[in-house]
Image (tube, helix red, strand yellow):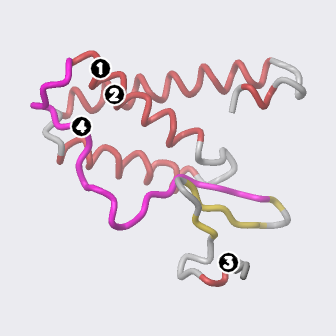
Amino acid sequence: KFEMETAEDFESSTLPTLDFQCWVEKGKILYKFFSKPMAKATLIMKNSALGENSKIASLTQEVVRRSKNTSEDVSMEVRLGIMDEYHQRLEQSQYSLEASRRILGAGLRGYKRIDNTCKAIDKETISKCI
């Protein structure tokens, strides 16, 4: 038997998927990054044996992923909240304020590069950017 979920089935009035929530507002589909409440509170720990460059690259790419999984039509308050929550997780993973700023800044610059590239190309190839 097939079961269907709708946004009305959830307290947030949004439809959660693997890593984003979506909803319809004023006839437009909006979406924002989502992580399950039971997700681990920490990221790659600062003192892990993984190489420093690998840690920074992975953490930076997570900023890009969160940005790509959030519509630019969502309020700046919501978008900042997603980055603030990520910053808190960086702190819980023992990264300094300076390291957190570098990671967030690099990730946001990377996302902006992707976004600018996508806006510069025609609509037929835009799906390659996403």
Q: Which amino acid does label 3 sit on?
A: Glu
Query: SS at mark 2?
Result: helix
Q: Quadrant of residue 104?
A: top left
Q: What separation in Å lies between label 2 and label 3 (alpha carbons)? A: 36 Å
User: Dominant secondary structure of the magenta stretch?
Assistant: loop
Instruction: Examine the structure image and report whether residue 15 is included in the region drawn in magenta.
Output: no
* Residue drawn at 19 percent across, 43 percent down: 91
Residue matched to label 4: 44
Q: In this view, which residue lies farthest toward the left?
A: 47
Q: Residue at x 71, y 18 (%)?
A: 117
Vertical order, 4 against 130 (above or below): below
Q: Position of residue 46 (x, y in %)?
A: 15, 32
* Mark before the other along the chain sequence, 1 or 4: 4
Mark positioned earlier in the residue sequence (2 or 3): 3
Image quarter hosting the C terminus: top right
Identify the mark at residue 54; answer none if there is no mark. 1
Mark sitting earlier along the chain (1/2):
1
Neighbour class for label 3 at 10 Å: few (<14), some, many (≥20)?
Answer: few
Q: Are marks 4 and 2 in contact (CB under 8 Å)?
A: no
Q: Is mark 4 on a helix, strand or loop?
A: loop
Q: Which amino acid does label 2 sit on?
A: Ile
| 34 left or right, relative to 39 | right
